[in-house]
Image: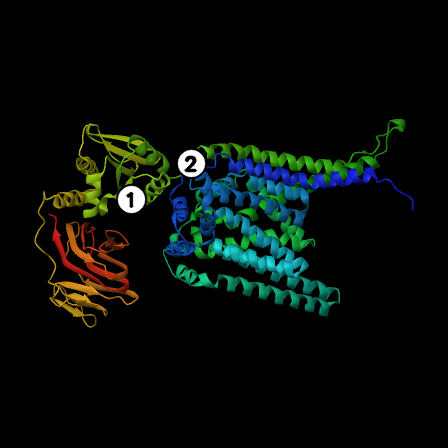
Amino acid sequence: MRYEAPNVGSRRERWLGQAGRLAPLLFLVTAGACLRFYDLGYRSLWLDEVSTAQVVRMPGMSSVLDYVARDPSATPLTYLITWFLRPIGSDDFAIRLPYAIAGLLAVIALYALAARLYGRAIGLVAGTLLAILPYAIFYSQESRSYAFLMLLTTAVMLAAYRAASRGRVIDWAFLAIAGALDLYTGYLGIAVLLAAYGYIGLVLAGNVAVGWRASRLREALAASARAGAMAILSAVLIGAAFLPWFGRLEAFLGRRDQAFGRVAAGHQPTLEDARSLLQQLDFHGILFWLLVAGIACAVIDTARGRWKQSLVPLVWFFVPLLGFAIGTGGGIVAIWPRYFGTVYPAAVLLAAAGIGGLARVVGIVVRLGQATLSRRPGPGFLSVPAPQLPAQSLARAVVMVCLCSLVALDALPADAAAYTRAKGSDYRGAVDAMLDADRGHPVVLVFGENPEWTVFGLGYYSWVHGSHLTVLDALKLSADSVKILQSGTTVWGAVLNSADLPSPATGDLTATLFNDIRLVRPAAGQAASIDQARSILSWAASFEPEITASTRLIDVVQGHGTPGPELLPSPTTSQREGGPLPLNRWILQPGSSLSPDGSAFVLDPGGRSINVYLNTLALKPGRQYLMSFSCLTSELVGAASVFVVAEGPTGQTAFPDGAGYQCGGSSDPDQGVFAVTIPDGATSAVLWLRATGTGSASFERVSLRSLQ
């Protein structure tokens, strides 16, 4: 047997070929990672990100699912990913890391899809565009679902193309898995699934038409029937996987204040609206015209026989947009830009196709020029020879590089600006400032616009630091809150800043601004923390009069104020639920009763929620009231709470908040006290005593008196 030396040249060619295939991928990974991981933890988490980050504080998966279920528009996948990765940390970088990785994987997924549709050159262009565009980078640096939506919707369309063109079982399984994950990432995934299965239906119908023209109708029908059965099976698997969350989807679709209900369908779109939206989506200037060129090229390619490839971006782009237009009418231009995350990769893919189409046109022009030169007769020995270089390929490459460079020159300055732009209120900076000044037991009173947001954000960063900083909503103080204020080492005020917010009028208070949050604290020398709280509340009452109720509550709890006469009827003035509901009479739902001496309400929920309530209290809009009671829950496994609910033109307002006053009397009675300011325009008010769970809870000495 003769020994043959290995072919060194062929081995080198294989290595070069492998390097050539890997080079675009390595470039995209490097560029995408650098632009997404750079300064990932620079900005403070803003409100929605804090909502995601809260899950790292939860002990188990069931707690996470219960938490997500409270938000009708939320789906659990990204929350669960954040919860599973909580061992890597709770700081801003750690919370955002999985979303940056998802954004990077979206770049790779779009490269893979574009390369399969149009070749590796267009795949590199599409991946590069998604890697450098500010929209994609920004949402890859935010701990919300949009980076995962871009990744998973791209995976769904790649799976749909593979399944429709090859029909292997593994491709249909890939589609089912990607589709289920997409739905669990966000309800916007429904539009992409409609696009994916719409594309599959068009391909199957097209295959039948091709078979009919080729006189192979029977074979085409049989193949399409098999593929259609697999498509139905994959759709059933997606539905079965989503079944545990289907009830939440139904509730979400039934809420008029959610989804497209947030956008005025009667909105009259203007050119400026459209221009502003395109600007926020990066599709302005040259990128807009590349998108238009890509749509035109895809339509032309469809007519010329490349319909399986060209229909992918067209269906992916237009089906969700059509759904948005049906749901919002003219309000489509008023939709928040982040909701276009499902269609954004399709727009980038079309822009890349536009670059490829323009490069093809230039290549055709060069080829025609070559042919003309090769046929032109020359003067004897001075005749011009035909060009020997692959001028057509070179011209196409130059055009693609130039167009990508023009997009990059427009995008990279915006990327640089985005790294230094803080989004939302700087909760982290505010908490850092308070803890730097006081490492003891500081207390911060929150007021102004949307105080629950500020309470939420400051409370999270207080937990991250492991500090003793306590955050209180100044409008929802209780007797326990007053005790916290009395024991605090310093008291601060926090408010979302606005142009019309007055500065402290005296030298007793100093203010510091952190992005959107203004911190206020008394000047040095005021030793008593409760006096610091009074100074802050007095300033806040100058622009938020309802704060006066909190000041008066402090006075009453400390024995410096006397509320008005009792406004509630005696507990013995009660009746069972059913029939007309007279005024000034307690209503007892089944499972509730009076104690034998008639002094207390006893609630036995029996595994559900029951109420004792007083309907249509004679409370006056704009007036302030003091609610007090004694609550004992030593025999209750569950929760007991007290609400005052005001009904007005803008809907219901619950006090002290949407969850009510949560009773803490597990061993000794909880002496609950809180203040209420009835909103202007309120037409009625209801007092609720509620217990949920098993066992029993008792409420006695329930009192409501005026603070004026």
Above or below residue 260? Residue 368 is above
Which picture quadrant has residue 683?
Answer: bottom left
Toward the bottom, the furthest residue is: 579
* Apparent side of residue 558 relative to residue 28 in the rendered image (left or right): left
Above or below residue 220? Residue 144 is above
Q: SS of the residue at dot 1?
A: helix
Q: Amino acid at mark 2?
A: Arg
* Apparent side of residue 669 relative to residue 73 in the rendered image (left or right): left
* Residue 274 point in image, percent of width and height: 47, 44
Q: SS of the residue at dot 2?
A: loop
Say the numbered circle drawn on residue 451. Answer: 1
Above or below residue 60? Residue 104 is above
User: Camera-side residue: 317 or 45?
Assistant: 45
Give the residue number, with chain letter if any, for mark 2.
43
* Residue 104 point in image, percent of width and height: 55, 42
User: Camera-side residue: 519 or 628?
Assistant: 628
Residue depicted at x 14% and y 46%? 557
* Residue 539 point in image, percent of width and height: 20, 36
Q: Amino acid at mark 1?
A: Pro
Give the Cα separation between the discs numbered 2 and 1. 21 Å
User: Camera-side residue: 382 or 511?
Assistant: 511
Q: Are marks 2 and 1 in contact (CB under 8 Å)?
A: no
